[in-house]
Amino acid sequence: MELLELMKYRRSIRKYQDRQISRDDMETIIEAGIYAPNAGGGQRSIIVGVRNAELTEKIGRLNVARFDRLRLSGSYVSVEQPSIIDDPTMKSGFYGAPAVCVVFAMKNFLYSIPDAFCCAENMVLMAAELGISSCIIARGEETFTGESGETFLKEWSIPENYIARCFVTLGYCDGEYPQSKPRKAQRSKIIE
Ligand SMILES: Cc1cc2nc3c(=O)[nH]c(=O)nc-3n(C[C@H](O)[C@H](O)[C@H](O)COP(=O)(O)O)c2cc1C
């Protein structure tokens, strides 16, 4: 697909089939993340791909466990693809996706968060190109703070000075793929 067309087509997907993505596709999506622009050319972000539905569900539940809904009261995300903000009964922040990528970045680096989200953006576009649905998910910081979260960090050999900044869920859209969202007017201008 032509790049701008792909960008307009890509949507955040919050309903997934059970079907797992291939290891090759996960590697390609991670490679896209690794090639993201990065502050000072430091290439600091680390991406961990979890291609295991059970594990993804476990981490997805940790992701939502410490979610403070009160801070978001009044927010509304999507009718077609309700988010955990729209539906407080949801138990996983990953919406049943069979796979997820965790983006880690250095704790005390000024551009740690933008670096991580640049990776995530590259990854969701790559996924869309491969016909794989995705959603960028926040709350990386809270997800691994409890005992079971810390166990994952040890198992994956994440350096002490690193923190999860965001996630990219991956899988195949269950049901109809949502239409492109209309854009709000007057959000850009060109000065000559
Ligand atoms: C920084 C950032 C954080 C996000 N965090 C979440 C999240 O935690 N949960 C979620 O369901 N969607 C999350 N999203 C996805 C947005 O809700 C989604 O991009 C937005 O509603 C626009 O919809 P679209 O991606 O389908 O165009 C996040 C997106 C960004 C850029």
Image (cartoon, rainbow, N blue to C red):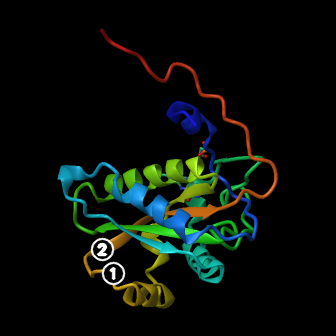
Q: Is residue 147 above or below residue 143?
A: below
Q: Quadrant of residue 152?
A: bottom left
Residue type at mark 1?
Ile
Question: From where the camera sits, is residue 106 visible?
Answer: yes
Mark 2: few/some/many CA within 10 Å (<14, 14-19, 20+):
some
Q: Residue drawn 47% across and 66% down?
A: 27
Percent x, y for residue 134? 60, 56
Q: Residue drawn 60% across and 63% down?
A: 170
Q: Which residue is mark 2?
A: 162
Q: Nearer the viewer, residue 9 or 78?
A: 9
- Horizontal side of residue 64 vs 29, given as left or right: right
Question: From where the camera sits, is residue 66 visible?
Answer: no
Mark 1: few/some/many CA within 10 Å (<14, 14-19, 20+):
some
> What label sits on residue 64 in the rendered view?
none
**Distance between the Cα atoms at labels 2 and 1?**
7 Å
Q: Quadrant of the N terminus?
A: top right
Percent x, y for residue 185? 57, 20
Percent x, y for residue 160? 27, 82
Residue type at mark 2?
Tyr
Q: Which residue is mark 1?
A: 158
